Image: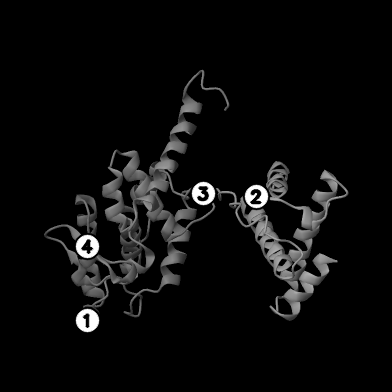
Amino acid sequence: MFIDSFIGFLRVEKNYSQHTLRAYANDLRSFQDYLAGVDESLSFPDVDADLVRGWMVELADDGAAPSSVSRKMSALRAFFDYLRREGHVDVNPAISLKNPKQRKRLPTFVKEEDMDYLLDELSFGEGYESCRDRMMIMCFYSTGMRLSELIGLDVGDVDMERSVIKVFGKRSKERMVPFGAEMKKEMENYLEQRSAFSPQSSALFLTRSGERVSQSLVYRMVREKLSAVTSVGKKSPHVLRHSFATAMLNNDAEIGVVKELLGHERLATTEVYTHLTFEELKKFYKKAHPRAGSN
């Protein structure tokens, strides 16, 4: 009775979609089944925070993902808010309980040896476009810049004398990113070819017709090149950004330095890469140590 009246309220007053109404109804009936399993005499006005907490534990034990438990808890909080407004319960027993922590997905990255093969062994072909594609890959991997930042680069943003690139990040925040001797040599070669190809445009990376490259063009190119050297699921410019950060930390760069190079505002955003390198460290340890076991 309570569930049906609540779903009717959501349909009429909130204009929720049929999909959402079905999801709410299923979640609440799941909770109702849980109550019956605890004690058949229990009804919704009898529910307290301990019962709700027990349901969360049972869901987790049954293998429900944190995101799924969080969604069910949202339905339960809304349901008890409705019952409280209607005078059926005095308090919302779910309101003080926190959702389970979401599992952080570790960033996908390409191993250093695979990137070495891509840049040192794989043939990009001849001509301006081939030179451009190789230069864009090197920019991503050597500086960690974002796709939008690379596309927005102008020739004037590259300071060859100081070996730095001026990058405009999120909210047009400017940062200076250094590059090494190998990239400087590649950039000199690229700028020579680019000048002969289209000297009028200010854009650093150009299409065959002399226009600034698009996000879709760069994305397709990166996916094609990474497919030749790695089997990682995601193959995108952002994976190269992750690969840059991971390589830096694996080679003893300080996390604060990596934060500045990536243009992160918060250190916590960069710290995900320390988890990544630690996971790799554990993986290599288990492979190499004779008594590492299989934890």
The x and y percentages for residue 122 are: 39, 51
Q: Which residue in the rendered view is the most extreme toward the left?
A: 161
Quick check: can you spot residue 29? Answer: yes
Amino acid carrying label 2: it is Ala
Mark 1 vs mark 3: in front: 3
Which residue is pictured at 23% across the width and 51% down the height? Answer: 182
Q: Quadrant of residue 114?
A: top left
Measured in 3D between alpha carbons, the distance from the residue under mark 1 to the one under mark 3, in whole angstroms, is 46 Å
Return the residue at label 4: 165
Quadrant containing the C terminus is top right
Return the residue at label 2: 65
Measured in 3D between alpha carbons, the distance from the residue under mark 3 to the one under mark 4, in whole angstroms, is 32 Å
The x and y percentages for residue 14 are: 69, 78
Mark 3 vs mark 4: in front: 3
Q: Residues within 10 Å of mark 1 (few under 14, many from 20)?
A: few
Q: Which mark is residue 200?
A: 1
Q: Quadrant of residue 136?
A: bottom left
Figure check: 22 above or below 106: below
